[in-house]
Amino acid sequence: MNDPNGLVWHKGEYHLFFQHNPLGREWGHMSWGHAVSTDLLNWEELPVAIREGEDGAIFSGSAVSIGDEIVAIYTRDKDKIQVQCIATSFDNGRTFTKFEDNPVLDLGMEHFRDPKVFRYQDHWIMAVVKAQEFLVCFYKSEDLKTWTPLSEFGRVGATGGQWECPDLFPLKIDGEEVWVLLVSLSPGGIKNTSGTQYFIGDFDGTTFTPRYSTDKPRWFDYGSHNYAGVTFNNEPNNKRIFMGWLNSWQKKEHAETSWTGAMTIPRELGLTRLNGEIVITQQPICQSVYELKVQVPGSGIVGLKGFVTLGYNVDTQTIFVDDYEAPYQVKDGELHIKVVVDQSSVELFTADGTRCITLAVFPPLGTSRVLTPF
Ligand code: FRU
């Protein structure tokens, strides 16, 4: 699997569609795999929801819930042309019918993809990338079928590789609405791998305007394995929940294992203030986390060790997992972190949610996943 697609809550279920090859273990024949959950913790995998067809492969996109319908908005890729298409489901996402007048948005471009559509006032907005021009393009529609261009934002922050999988959404801080634009890029992220940056700003229905300097990127994650992540539409509790692809394009196959990719733990996003700026926060939605709350020493490192070593380096003021690190200042000399561990992954969060490091890890067979304080 790769990217999460069509994240939407619809009639009691969270839907996770995902980039998937129904015919093999390597990337190809892209289609939308499907899993559902009622609690974001337990997932049931269902048959492939939207298959590659004669007309092309089904690349990344989003989904919206309209009454009894789920409408998927995805990129169709064929013969080096990428266009935006829609498909409709009346059976809670189990099967989809492609719209007969697809595509709904066609610029005749090779790298134009990953539409994220959301409701804005009385209409729909789409954020979609011109990947190799490092641009997020915004469009407007009344019916998901006719799209009018609004504005473009880009060529700022990190512009390595290609820009992919944008997401734009509002969050509140102290009663004020602030807009967050997520943009994945690959390579050009941490350690020049696949990464996700974010911009804090304002959206007036036409234009996204960043609030702060865009000279340097603000990283959403300081690991190498949280890519193409987007948030759920129609979340019933009005929360902003994110999932990313827990892998990178730079080393996505691990021949020594049967692993074919995973998603990050779902994370609830929020905002806080740090060093005079509004920043994003992430809290893992997970029942079993390691939680460590310790006074930090005068110098050196403190944390958890086992199949990875992670924690806080007092001298460099960074949280770290093995050789990955993120700048962080502890408050009142106390380190408070949460760590989610799975067979092939580790996700470290500071308890205030301002920093995280996500990594895929493949310890030798039989290695314990237990971590102990040091
Ligand atoms: C991101 C991405 C998307 C594309 C999909 C293809 O990982 O490259 O831009 O739609 O994967 O599988």
Image: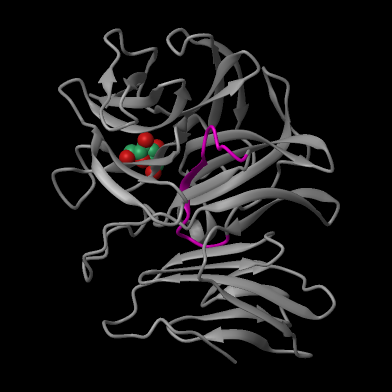
> Residue sitting at 32 percent across and 23 percent down?
89
Q: Is residue 10 above or below residue 340?
A: above
Q: Which quarter of the rendered image does ligand 1 occupy?
A: top left
- State yes or no: residue 307 in magenta: no
In screen coordinates, is 153 left or right of 256? right
Q: Is residue 265 above or below residue 332?
A: above
> Residue sitting at 50 percent across and 70 percent down?
288
Q: Which residues are magenta?
A: 222-237
In screen coordinates, is 230 left or right of 355? left
Residue 346 horizontal/vertical position (percent): 47, 70
Task: Choose top left, top right, bottom left or bottom right for residue 111.
Answer: top left
Q: Residue furthest front?
A: 12
Task: Choose top left, top right, bottom left or bottom right for residue 154.
Answer: top right
Camera-side residue: 178 or 166? 178
Residue 357 horizontal/vertical position (percent): 55, 65
Q: Is residue 186 visible?
A: no
In screen coordinates, is 370 left or right of 95? right
Q: Is residue 232 visible?
A: yes
